[in-house]
Amino acid sequence: QKEVEQDPGPLSVPEGAIVSLNCTYSNSAFQYFMWYRQYSRKGPELLMYTYSSGNKEDGRFTAQVDKSSKYISLFIRDSQPSDSATYLCAMSAGSSGSARQLTFGSGTQLTVLP
Amino acid sequence: EADIYQTPRYLVIGTGKKITLECSQTMGHDKMYWYQQDPGMELHLIHYSYGVNSTEKGDLSSESTVSRIRTEHFPLTLESARPSHTSQYLCASSKSVQAGNTIYFGEGSWLTVV
């Protein structure tokens, strides 16, 4: 079983919809949680970063962490065609500054239809 | 915005050829990484470096080699390319002390070996 599970999709929604992307994990030591967005044929870019449990909002994006359920979510409000990309969750236990400890999900491919 | 550059972006090369994928970053990060990603698949760490003259292999076995002679430069070399090496190669970097192990990716190098 993988340490981080992410629904691969693909997910297709109409413009303006609320999108929910999710990851589950098994390692209870994870305390740093990130969401990356990857456009086709590009490298991933950091979208949201949260520490421990709770919510974090940035514009149309909200990251939610529920450590008790080992479940994280990314919500996109008023989705736009420009949000069409693959979204990867990533998480780690330590803050040593090394991505050597990062564990990525496999990514969810999202398409927002105009 | 991350300043990490990869060249070439796209390369088609014959079997048996030697290739070097270049990666440079201007952020002064001491840690650098190479990931391999097949289309629609997970990111796999193949090499990482904690600083000059420090390199180690990642989780996924790779026939490629890396060097770190300068802080800003982390090239990846394949001595004899094979079709099984066809993939996307992503270079990344992070600060020595970075909360949450956030890393920054380049745009990737797409390698096709024919």
Image: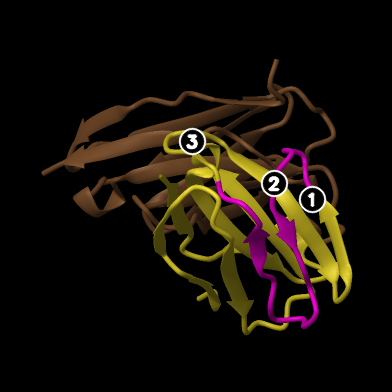
Chain colours: A brown, B yellow
Identity of the amino acid at label 3? Gly
Q: CA distance from mark 1 to mark 2?
A: 8 Å
In x, y percent, where is residue B27? 65, 82
Q: Which residue is mark 1?
A: A100
Q: Residue at x 65, y 61 (%)?
A: B77
Q: Magenta stretch: residue B60 in it?
A: yes
Dots 1, 3 in contact, CB < 8 A: no
Q: Which residue is mark 3?
A: A107
Mark 2 residue element: strand
In x, y percent, where is residue B24? 61, 77
Mark 1 residue element: helix
Chain to which mark 3 belongs: A
In x, y percent, where is residue A18? 30, 36
Q: Is residue B88 found left or right of A86 in the rendered image? A: right
Dots 1, 2 in contact, CB < 8 A: yes
Q: Quick check: can you spot residue B100?
A: no
Identity of the amino acid at label 2? Leu
- Mark drawn on residue B45: 2
Q: Are marks 3 and 2 on the same chain?
A: no
Q: Residue at x 48, y 60 (%)?
A: B108
- Mark drawn on residue B89: none
